[in-house]
Image (spheres, helix red, strand yellow):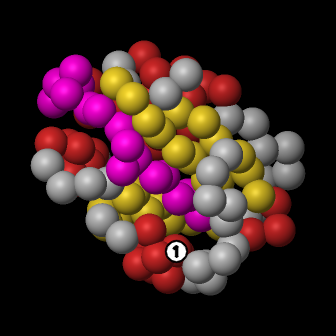
Amino acid sequence: MPIQYEYIADLKCLYAVGSGKVQRQDFLDYHHKITISEPPPSLLVLSDYRELDSSALTASDIEEIRASALSKTQNRYARVREAIVVSEGLTYGLSRMYAGVFHSDKYEVNILTDINEAKAWLGLAPEDLPQAI
């Protein structure tokens, strides 16, 4: 699976890492498989997609992926903050589209190219998350 994830309960953070070519269904499967047994009121999400190839995704795929993420968190969390770390190029543009396609007062998204800036934006220290899953 192109997207691996781990929930770190002490940090209230879902840490996801993507690599290789990704399809719409990979994101939908990832959202479906996420289980957090004791959801905190506020959830942090660090999505590291610097090694992800998103060239197979379309604009309608991005809309469906965003809708899936919103539905997965709706009524479970008072607030979600997701930092998406990407390389420059297509994935950056698609991630910006993802952040803006649907507005949510409860689900804030920031697109960054530096993992430490993403951690800082989430309020995490540089050493808080593992280097790999």
Pinpoint residue 37: horizontal percent, then vertical percent: 85, 44
Q: Residue at x 46, y 52 (%)?
A: 48
Our reading of the magenta stretch's main secondary structure is strand
Please say whether residue 75 is one of the residues in the magenta stretch.
Answer: no
Residue 125 visible in image: yes
Q: Residue at x 29, y 33 (%)?
A: 53
Q: Quadrant of the N terminus?
A: top right
On the rendered structure, is 14 left or right of 117?
A: right
Q: Nearer the viewer, residue 75 or 13?
A: 13
Dot 1: within a 10 Å radius of its alpha carbon, few (fewer than 14), some, or many (20 or more) residues? many
Q: In the structure shown, which secondary structural element does the residue marked by tag 1 occupy? A: helix
Q: Is residue 21 above or below residue 92?
A: above
Provide the residue span drawn in magenta.
44-59
Q: Amino acid at mark 1?
A: Lys
Pinpoint residue 128: horizontal percent, then vertical percent: 69, 73
Image quadrant where residue 65 sits? top left
Q: Residue at x 43, y 63 (%)?
A: 83
Question: Tag count in the figure?
Answer: 1
Please say whether residue 58 is one of the residues in the magenta stretch.
Answer: yes
- The residue beneath circle 1 is 119
Pinpoint residue 31: horizontal percent, then vertical percent: 56, 32
